[in-house]
């Protein structure tokens, strides 16, 4: 990762040898049961299976899970093989109940997956929580296939522990969309506004998200992590489902997107990542978030359409 030659406009984050030494103290490990105060705002660089039993139960307001999908994938040398569906369900059952036990009774849980792992995730998630919805989001990136349809969507299952008592703030995730049919009432715009940049309407978000861009080389949030999620996606989950000052937990932190976005939005965070390489990227991004808390595509308190330049 360090020392890779990049084109001038390439803003991909990497870590130099010198930075590595400065960032290592920001990583935590736990070898005995710990308190909520000890895990708050930490990046735990450990195997989830080794640390999960030490983490405090009923502590998180929101759990965001972006696990290895049922695909062959190399995470900084940690190689995942595609499994048959029964094996993948067994893998999910090994950690999902323990991760969910870290949530407060009012906790919400989101689990990311692709079409192939979606049914397994739904089945195991419903054994442990009340599934309320499935969000589908459109990825712009993806290779075409000659004998199949190009895969350009992913799912996120939304579940809660208590259907009667969970936090949900729809007003904080409104979408600003260009008006297609600009109706007027007595000559005045009806439920939309005229601006110098065009005509826009604020709308309630649905469970289909088509306004996201997967991080790429010219975006400042981009890293070399192979499956990095956009901060804008995490911002929607966190704003809607975690109160300000609450704790967001991510058991497969990767390059740190969940923690970084939580920090930018005034929430506490805790994430676990097995790879030192990725955990260091998370630590670097968390430090940068102290200087710049901007989230591409989320401006003036609203989510703008993809490619709207905001
Ligand atoms: C799908 S990626 C998460 C990407 C992340 N959402 C981001 O935006 O960068 C899954 C991550 O889980 C990590 N991982 C896999 N098995 C793990 C384990 N047993 N304990 C901790 N982390 C693990 C991988 O190294 C990988 O970075």
Image (spheres, rainbow, N blue to C red):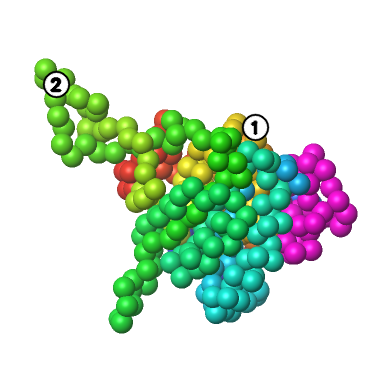
- Does 53 lie within the magenta span? yes
Tell which residue pokes out farthest to the left in this image: 187
- Mark 2 neighbour class, 10 Å CA radius: few under 14, some 14 to 19, many 20 or more: few
Residue found 76% across the figure and 57% down from its top: 52
- Of labels 2 and 1, earlier in sequence is 2
Other residues around mark 1 within 10 Å, as few (<14) / some (14–19) / many (≥20): some
Give the residue pinned by disc 2.
185
Q: Which residue sits at x=14%, y=21%?
A: 185
Question: What residue do we see at 57% from left, 79% from top?
Answer: 83
Q: Position of residue 258 (x, y in %)?
A: 58, 49
Give above or below for 53 relative to 259.
below
In the image, which disc is placed on residue 304? none
Position in image of residue 149 (x %, y %):
31, 73
Residue of label 1: 245
Q: Count how many numbered circles sit on residues in the image.
A: 2
**Residue 211 in picture, x, y percent from top left:** 36, 48
Q: Which residues are magenta?
A: 27-56
């Amino acid at each position: 990762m360090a020392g890779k030659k990049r084109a001038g406009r390439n803003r991909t984050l990497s870590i130099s040898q010198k930075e590595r030494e400065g960032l290592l103290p920001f990583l935590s490990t736990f070898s005995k049961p710990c308190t909520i105060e000890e895990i708050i705002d930490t990046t735990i660089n450990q195997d989830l299976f080794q640390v999960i039993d030490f983490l405090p139960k009923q502590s998180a307001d929101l759990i965001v899970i972006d696990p290895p999908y049922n695909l062959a994938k190399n995470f900084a040398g940690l190689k995942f093989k595609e499994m048959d569906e029964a094996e993948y369900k067994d893998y999910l059952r090994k950690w999902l109940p323990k991760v969910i036990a870290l949530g407060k009774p009012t906790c919400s849980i989101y689990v990311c997956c692709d079409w192939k792992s979606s049914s397994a995730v739904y089945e195991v998630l419903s054994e442990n929580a009340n599934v309320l919805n499935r969000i589908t989001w459109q990825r712009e990136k993806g290779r075409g296939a000659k004998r199949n349809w190009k895969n350009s969507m992913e799912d996120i299952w939304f579940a809660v522990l208590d259907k009667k008592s969970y936090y949900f703030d729809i007003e904080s995730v409104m979408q600003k969309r260009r008006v297609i049919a600009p109706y007027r009432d007595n000559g005045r715009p009806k439920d939309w506004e005229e601006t110098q940049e065009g005509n826009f309407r604020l709308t309630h978000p649905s469970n289909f998200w088509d306004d996201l861009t997967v991080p790429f080389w010219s975006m400042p949030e981009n890293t070399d992590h192979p499956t990095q999620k956009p901060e804008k996606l995490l911002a929607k989950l966190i704003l809607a489902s975690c109160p300000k000052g609450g704790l967001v937990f991510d058991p497969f932190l990767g390059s740190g997107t969940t923690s970084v976005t939580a920090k930018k939005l005034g929430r506490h965070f805790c994430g676990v990542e097995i790879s030192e390489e990725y955990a260091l990227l998370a630590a670097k991004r968390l430090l940068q978030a102290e200087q710049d808390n901007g989230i591409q595509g989320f401006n003036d308190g609203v989510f703008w359409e993809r490619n709207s330049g905001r």
